[in-house]
Image (spheres, grey):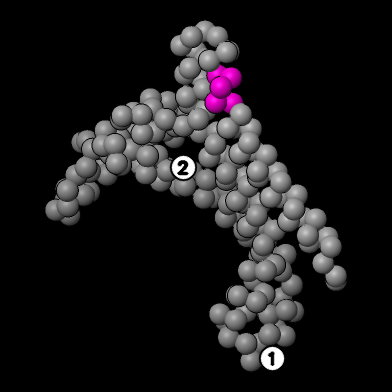
Amino acid sequence: MVVLSLVFRGLYAPHGPLNAVLGALGLPQPTWLLDPDLALPAIMAMDVWSASGYYMVIFLAGLEAIPRELYEAAKLEGASWWSCFVHITLPLLRPTLLFVLVVNTVRSLQIFAEVFVMTRGGPLHRTTTMVYYLLRAGASTASISATRAPSPTCCSGSRCCWHLCRSRSSAAAREPA
């Protein structure tokens, strides 16, 4: 993640390739990582780009697990592609969607290297994440006690995801086949 963050820091540089393309098109050239309103979306765009391949493989596996016979039967009944998508694909991809949602939520809560390399929590602390704050607070005071106060927030977020997954799986188990 450090190398990717360095590459994107170069892309987002004031005289970097992204601003060169925008300038050639006659568009304004923002200071991506120095603008408080653009720094976090820039890091989010890099994070989405870096994880998209992984999630595409997960979704492809979920789509491959859907039996083709269901689509064939729906076509014989005269279902449109939208109807097939809404009534076959989405319901059968629900476990995959939940998995991706939980994994991405956990991954988003763990972002540290990207923020450290690209902005160091700035500008105006707009890109400070919980993990970055905890590690910076613990390192600056050389004491673990500075990181104890915000830790319950992290744990409660993890606990909410766990309860959501547990309630969904237990509800699915109670449904008649």
Residue 111 in view = yes
Residue 6 in view = no
Query: What amino acid type should be assigned to the residue bearing mark 2?
Result: Asp
Q: Which segment did they paint magenta? A: 147-151
Mark 1, secondary structure of its residue: helix
Q: Residue at x 60, y 75 (%)?
A: 85
Q: Is residue 18 above or below residue 111?
A: below
Query: Spatial distance from mark 2 to mark 1, Cα to Cα?
Result: 42 Å
Q: Position of residue 21 (x, y in %)?
A: 22, 48
Q: Position of residue 68 (x, y in %)?
A: 71, 75
What residue is pinned by disc 1? 76
Q: Is residue 106 above or below residue 177?
A: above
- Nearest the viewer among 132 and 74 is 132
What residue is pinned by disc 2? 47
Query: What amino acid type should be assigned to the residue bearing mark 1?
Result: Leu
Q: Residue at x 50, y 30 (%)?
A: 130
Residue 123 lies within the magenta run: no
Mark 2 or mark 1: name the one nearer the start of the chain.
2
In the picture as drawn, the residue positioned furthest to the top comes out as 142
Q: Position of residue 76 (x, y in %)?
A: 69, 91
**Quadrant in which residue 38 is drawn:** top left
Mark 2, secondary structure of its residue: helix
**Quadrant in which residue 89 is drawn:** bottom right
Of the 4 image quadrants, the one containing the C terminus is bottom right
Other-residue count near label 2 (Cα within 10 Å), few / some / many at <14 / 14–19 / ≥20: some
Q: Residue at x 59, y 26 (%)?
A: 151
In the picture as drawn, the residue positioned furthest to the left comes out as 26
Say which mark, if any, is on residue 16. none
The secondary structure making up most of the magenta span is loop
